[in-house]
């Protein structure tokens, strides 16, 4: 009898548009997870750009009422922080190198992984550049880097400076490279017309351009920049020990 009554009750709830007990509606906050929301948001940004992301668009992508998203992420600021967190989660924290590897080699590996992670989400670069890193998940790569830095002998001030210098350099490089690869109305450009440069005024520039190898110089430039940062900080620690 109670089973029949339960079925009748479920039928009445269904007739009124209410879900059966134990089944949250599709637009209920309990039917969502933070991970699903963030994954959908990053997918929108990757595919259509940051300007395409809105709570309405995100709700439509998830098939829920946009208001349900606020149960997990209270505002768009929290959503942006979550996107930064998702991007940072892609950084390799150690699977590509051994703890016995030289510290500078480990740091170089993490720098390359950060670069590759950023280039995997070029449309998210503006929000990564603008938002502070402040969630536990997004701070884990920094914690791992600081652990390696501590073994080198950097002071706390030097350690923070190293993280900031590396972060600013890699982020700036990634933004420039992404613009070069994907282009936009702002970044569209053609090759430099060397023939239009007066030789008397630009002798050094013309010589360098003539002798420089052809092809994409970005990869070489990235390694040269990291060399300068790593050797510069290492020399600073070494000089302090003399």
Image (cartoon, rainbow, N blue to C red):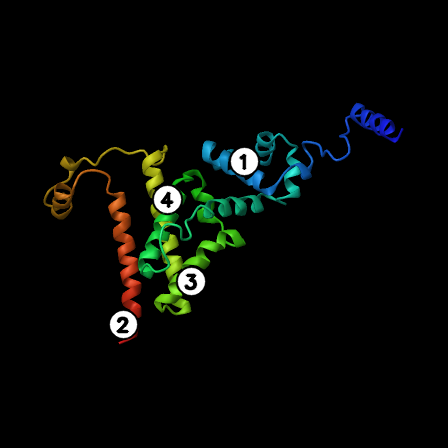
Screen quadrant of the C terminus: bottom left
Q: What element carries label 2?
A: helix
State the residue position of label 1: 40
Report the mark closest to the observer, 1 or 3.
Answer: 3
Q: Nearer the viewer, mark 3 or mark 2?
A: 3
Q: In 3D space, how far apart are the residues under numbered discs 1 and 3 (Cα atoms)?
A: 33 Å
First in sequence: mark 3 vs mark 2: 3
Q: Residue furthest left?
A: 200
Left or right of 51 in this view: 107 = left
Q: Which mark is residue 147?
A: 3
Residue furthest bottom as drawn? 242
Alpha carbon separation for disc pair 4 and 3: 21 Å
In the displayed structure image, the side of residue 69 where residue 118 appears, left or right: left
Specify the quadrant of the image occupied by residue 206.
top left
Describe residue 2's horizontal placement relative to residue 194 as left or right.
Answer: right
Report the label total: 4
**Separation (CA) of disc 1 from disc 2:** 50 Å
Reading the image, the residue beneath label 4 is 116
Residue 83 higher or lower than 106, as above or below: above
Provide the residue designation for mark 2.
239
The residue sitting at 10% across, 45% down in the picture is 200
The picture places residue 92, in percent across and down from the top left corner, at: 41, 49
At label 2, counting other C-alpha atoms closer than 10 Å, the crowd grade (few under 14, some 14-19, many 20 or more) is few
> Does dot 3 land on a helix, a strand or a loop?
helix
Q: Quadrant of residue 218?
A: top left
Residue 119 appears in the rendering: yes
């Amino acid at each position: 009898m109670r089973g029949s009554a339960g079925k009748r009750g479920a039928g009445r709830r269904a007739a009124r548009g209410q879900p059966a007990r134990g089944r949250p509606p599709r637009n209920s906050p309990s039917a969502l997870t933070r991970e699903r929301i963030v994954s959908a948001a990053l997918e929108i940004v990757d595919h259509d750009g940051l300007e395409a992301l809105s709570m309405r668009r995100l709700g439509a992508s998830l098939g829920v009422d946009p208001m349900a998203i606020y149960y997990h992420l209270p505002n768009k600021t929290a959503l942006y922080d979550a996107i930064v967190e998702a991007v940072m989660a892609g950084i390799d924290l150690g699977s590509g190198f051994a703890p016995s590897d030289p510290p500078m080699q480990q740091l170089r590996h993490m720098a390359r992984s950060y670069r590759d992670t950023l280039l995997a989400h070029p449309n998210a670069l503006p929000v990564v550049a603008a938002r502070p890193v402040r969630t536990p998940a997004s701070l884990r790569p920094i914690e791992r880097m600081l652990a390696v830095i501590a073994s080198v002998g950097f002071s706390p001030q030097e350690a923070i400076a190293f993280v900031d210098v590396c972060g600013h350099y890699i982020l700036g490089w990634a933004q420039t490279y992404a613009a070069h690869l994907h282009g936009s109305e702002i970044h569209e450009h053609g090759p430099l017309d060397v023939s239009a440069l007066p030789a008397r005024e630009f002798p050094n520039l013309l010589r360098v351009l003539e002798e420089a190898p052809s092809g994409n110089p970005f990869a070489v430039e990235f390694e040269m920049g990291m060399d300068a940062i790593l050797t510069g900080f290492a020399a600073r620690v070494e000089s302090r020990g003399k």
